[in-house]
Amino acid sequence: MSAATSVSLAVADAVWAEIKCAGQASDEHLSILETLFGKNMLRACKIVDERGVRRVTGAPSGRSLFLVMGESKRKEEYLCFPEHLCTCYSFFYDVVGRGEQLSCKHQLAARLAEAVGEHQEIEVKDEELADMLANL
């Protein structure tokens, strides 16, 4: 990971922490995130505005993941761990493969929705959560 990438991610983490603490994203926060993540941040905001983020939490473990709606007409849902992985094509192609993006729009939408409390909560048994992960 380059020094510039490390700095960008550190700045983003600080902004995410501020948003979570405040419970809302200011114009300044969103401007910084847009500078860091470009068009993916704008698309993430649209997904959050459309209530396209659900957090699925297993019981009794409390482990969770996010299901984030895609933007295409098919309205796919992508399994997402906001800081680590998304099952969308863009994550594997643009983030992992070419290294052109720091995060995909689904990861950003999940982080934003969690930080401002704009996601649906779903509780399932741990076994069901395990099945979701096994079917990746």
Image (spheres, helix red, strand yellow):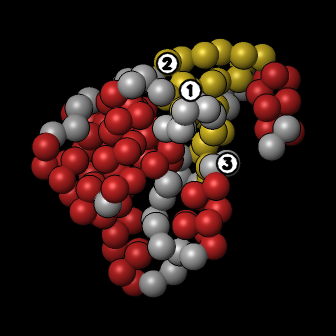
Q: Which residue is disc 2 drawn over?
A: 120
Q: Amino acid at mark 1?
A: Arg
Q: Which residue is disc 1 drawn over?
A: 55
Mark 1 Cα shell of 10 Å, populated few (<14), some (14-19), many (≥20): many
- Circles 1 and 3 in contact, beta carbons < 8 Å: no
Q: Is residue 61 visible?
A: yes
- Circles 3 and 2 in contact, beta carbons < 8 Å: no
Left or right, 73 with respect to 36, comes to right
Q: CA distance from mark 1 to mark 3?
A: 15 Å
User: Could you tell me which residue is drawn at 55 percent across and 67 percent down?
Assistant: 94
Mark 3 Cα shell of 10 Å, populated few (<14), some (14-19), many (≥20): some
User: Could you tell me which residue is drawn at 50 percent across and 44 percent down?
Assistant: 106
61 or 93, which lies in front? 93
The label nearer to you, 1 versus 3, is: 3
Q: Is residue 3 above or below residue 46?
A: below
Q: Is residue 65 visible?
A: no
Q: Amino acid at mark 2?
A: Gln
Q: Amino acid at mark 3?
A: Thr
User: Could you tell me which residue is drawn at 48 percent across and 58 percent down?
Assistant: 103
Residue 24 point in image, percent of width and height: 23, 32
Q: Earlier in the sequence, mark 1 or mark 2?
A: 1
Q: Is residue 79 above or below residue 75?
A: below
- Circles 1 and 2 in contact, beta carbons < 8 Å: yes
Residue 112 point in image, percent of width and height: 37, 39
Q: Helix or strand or loop: what does disc 2 sit on?
A: strand
